[in-house]
Image: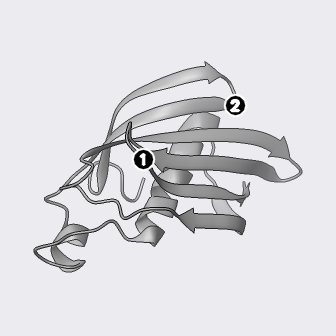
Amino acid sequence: MLLQDKFYKVNGVEKTDEQNAVFHCTLLSDCDVYRGHFPGNPVSPGVCNIEMIKECAMMLTGQRLVIKGIKQCRLTAVASPAVCPEVDVTVAVTPVEGGYSIVASIADSNQSYMEYKGEMAL
C-alpha cells in the first residue's frame, strides 16, 4: 500500500457483502503530503483521494489493482484533516472482464468530498 498508514489510516471496515464496504478512515495530518500541499491550510490532493479509493478497493477484493480508466471523478468539496479528520470511503466493486468496475465516494456525516466511477484492472 502506498498511502495507507502514511496519508490515511483505516480504523474499521463494514462489509455489507463481498462487493460493498465502508472504510472508516482518519486523514493523518502529520503526513508530508499535507506539509507540502498548501502549508498552513492543508488540503487532500485529488490524486491522493483517488489512490485511497484504489487501496480500499484492493482491500475489498484482496487483489492488486491498477486504474484502467476513470469515467467520472467529481470533487464535491475540499477534504482536509483540519476540516474532516475522519471520513468514510464507500466502495462498491462489480467484476468485469480483467478487473472490476468501481463506484466509490469519500464523505463524512456532513458532506461528500469525492464521487468516483471507473474501472480497475488486475
Image coordinates of residue 7 in percent, x first then y, are 29, 57
Q: Is residue 22 left or right of residue 121?
A: left
At mark 2, the secondary structure is: loop
Question: Which quadrant would residue 107 be assigned to in this image?
Answer: top left
At mark 1, the secondary structure is: loop
Q: Amino acid at mark 1?
A: Gln
Q: Identify the residue at horizontal 10%, vertical 74% (top origin).
A: 40
Q: Is residue 107 left or right of residue 122?
A: left
Give the residue pinned by disc 2: 19
Mark nearer the viewer, 2 or 1: 1
Q: Identify the residue at horizontal 38%, vertical 71% (top origin).
A: 45
Q: In the image shown, does 32 or 45 lie closer to the viewer?
A: 45
- Please indicate, yes or no, whether residue 10 appears anywhere in the rendered image: yes
Image coordinates of residue 48 in percent, x first then y, are 42, 65
Which residue extends farthest front? 110
Q: Amino acid at mark 2?
A: Gln
Give the residue pinned by disc 1: 111
Question: Which quadrant would residue 95 be assigned to in this image?
Answer: top right
Image coordinates of residue 98 in percent, x first then y, are 84, 53
